[in-house]
Amino acid sequence: MADTPRRFAPVQSAQDRRRFFRLDDQLQMSLRRATEDEQRGARARGSDVMADVDRRLGVLIAAARVQAPAVAELAELLNRKLDHVIQTLELNEELAQRASFREYAVNLSACGMALSCGERFEPGEKMVVEILLPPNATRLVLQARAVKVTPRPDGGYDLKADFAGIEAEDQEFLIQYIMRRQSQLLQQMREERELRPGALAAATRDSSGNS
């Protein structure tokens, strides 16, 4: 009888294993349902659109300086005014976004997350997750897909979600944060363990001196 060929589990690289490192942390986050454009993956980057508009305006204004200087000056003034309006709107949008952030106790990896939230998401539903990562409140915007949603007795929901189509740079940034944060937490635990015997000895001495 022929020998049954042995099956070997695929060997995971160090990079693959790092993607699944998990961290329990407290983070400022914002969750919302993805828009129709975001669900289709048609996310036009506003900065790219405005950069293209600025380039085309510059070409037209340069041509107008030769043919109609007054029109060119008018266009430049209108462009400055528009820039001021855009900056004001961007500031208001940033303030509104920060107001939507709240602190979550999250179990985080470079592949997904698990947390409790007040809003119900349906399994398979796409969402946009924004995270402010310490220490500099670096803003990370990720698309995610709800995998499991479980009602809680308090009326909230336990949500498990996978990050969908995460960019390699964003994933590496998350991995680096998780590894750095894990190192910090382990160092804190070691310091606390080292302090406990000393604190116990001091308490024993105080008790002996008072008796």
Image (spheres, helix red, strand yellow):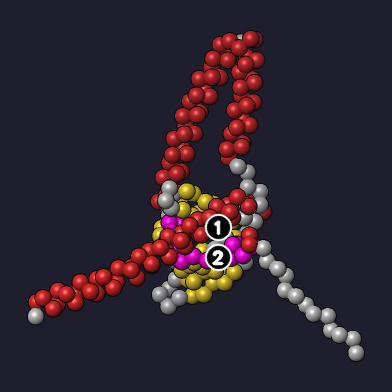
Give the vertical position of 136 relative to 127 (above or below): above
Percent position of residue 114, x then y: 51, 68
- The residue at 28%/73% (across/down) is 197
Between 210 and 75, which is closer to the camera in this rendering?
210
Percent position of residue 5, x then y: 83, 80
Amino acid type at mark 2? Phe
Side of 32 where 209 appears, left or right = left
Question: Around disc 1, counting alpha carbons within 10 Å, would you say few (fewer than 14), some (14 to 19), or many (20 or more)?
Answer: many
Side of 7 where 128 appears, left or right = left
For the residue labelled by badge 2, is the local secondary structure a helix, a strand or a loop? loop
Which residue reaches farthest bottom? Answer: 1
**Quadrant into which the N terminus falls:** bottom right
Side of 8 where 109 appears, left or right = left
Q: Please check the rendered image and state whether residue 94 is part of the magenta-colored stretch, yes or no.
A: no
For the residue labelled by badge 1, is the local secondary structure a helix, a strand or a loop? helix
- The residue at 48%/71% (across/down) is 157
Between 178 and 83, which is closer to the camera in this rendering?
178
Q: What residue does disc 2 label?
A: 21
Give the vertical position of 104 relative to 35 (above or below): below
- The residue at 55%/57% (across/down) is 175
**Residue 175's mark?**
1
Amino acid type at mark 1? Ile
**Marks 1,2: beta carbons within 8 A:** yes
